[in-house]
Image: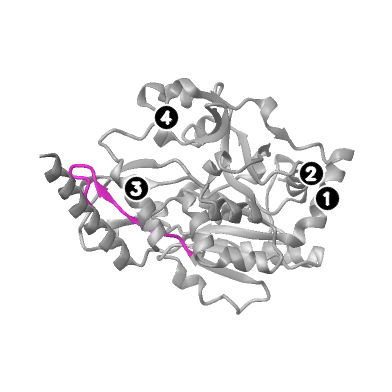
Amino acid sequence: MEDTNIMELEIKETIVARRMEKRGLMNRDISFFLSAWRHMTQKRSVVDWKHIKPVTGDQVFKLPEETSLKYNELYGLGEQEMSKCAIVKLNGGRATTMGGTVPKCMIPVKNEKNFLDIVMGQIMASNDRNGIEMPLILMNSFFTDHVTEKIVGQTPLIIMNFIQNEYPRIREDNLMPLDTGTDDDWCPAGHGDFFSSLEGSGCLDGLLELGYTYAFISNIDNLSAEVSPVILGQMVSKNHDFMMEVTKKTANDIKGGAPVRYNGNLSLLEIAEVPQDNMADFQDIEKFQFFNTNNLWIDLKALKKLITEQRLNLPIIQNRKNICERDIIQIETAMGAGLQCFSSPGLVEVPRNRFTPVKKMEDLVELQSDLYTMNTNYQLQKKTAESY
């Protein structure tokens, strides 16, 4: 009986591997998925709650006042290093939550400019102000790649793009891939796939060869996430190889991934990893005060070393959904979980004005309204009560 079960597993594994090969995935990404798939059970992949400790305010660097000497010191240090920084935007989303099926980056936001227009404008304005050439790196999905490949090499801005991996969606009833014959059978690999896809595409080596040392990463729908000389200065001054921008949780953020100490090590806890019995604790904003904005800073040389030495081991997240009237499991990883892999990670608390994501129609309508203005540097600014 045991031999029969092993044989069945090997047959299923071959089927999964062939589907992924046909989709164009690299061998190492197929191996990673198969390893996670083999260990999949009907139970959720959760953490051992007794080893979880929420991060407290004294473990998070708070940005100094803009009038302080410390602020000026960090600003100057970061300004010197900005020419070595690449700007990465996670650009795989489609606007399904806003009633459409177009790439989110192409949705008009302000003054007839879409997300991609505004991001490009912000970077070019910053480059002009500082006399540097920070490039824009786009992590696309198969859905968004066709709309951005047309602009590569056609703008004054250096633009590189690469495609995020896709994984098979797994049926919960038989642990086999969903097989509708449509793109619904596939899902993004989670933004933790950024590390592998950046390296596998050759983009990481290309950036290092051009002399870029740092990358600032954020979601393309968070137009407040511009490169900050002060945060870069803090990263350089403390020799951090990975930094996460966090901000205080509100009642609207209870599902956001939270920085924690897990077995004493700095890590990121996503809601899909939380045992159901502990969900109320995780969603208590007094206990878990901070959440990950997904604005991240990484040292590219440190990333290359981790990948080369096969030490970038991100925890697997089993994300359960209902697709095509089937209960399915999506195998994902979170980019912020890199906290536990890099040797010198850090957390920085940022004000809420660095986190204005557009996740639903109400968010978009607010940005499009007179409540926000956009200046000549393509920076969006929220009007205060005194402005009216």
The amino acid type of the residue labelled 4 equals: Val
User: On the image, numbered disc 3 is attached to which residue?
Assistant: 35
The residue type indicated by label 1 comes to Leu
Question: Within 10 Å of the Cα at label 3, are there few (<14), some (14-19), or many (20+) other Cα atoms?
Answer: few
Give left or right: position of 333 versus 59: left
Percent of width and height locating residue 154: 60, 79
Image vertical order of residue 270 relative to residue 307, above or below = above
Q: Closer to the N terminus: mark 2 or mark 4?
A: 4
Residue at the disc numbered 4:
47
- Of residue 218 and residue 99, the one placed in the foreground of this image is 218
User: Alpha-carbon neighbours of circle 2 within 10 Å: few (<14), some, or many (≥20)?
Assistant: few
- For the residues marked 2 and 4, what is the alpha-carbon distance in whole angstroms? 33 Å
Span colored in magenta: 163-176
Q: CA distance from mark 3 to mark 4?
A: 19 Å
Whether residue 377 sits left or right of residue 105 in the image: it is: right
Q: Is residue 70 magenta?
A: no
Residue identified by numbered label 1: 77
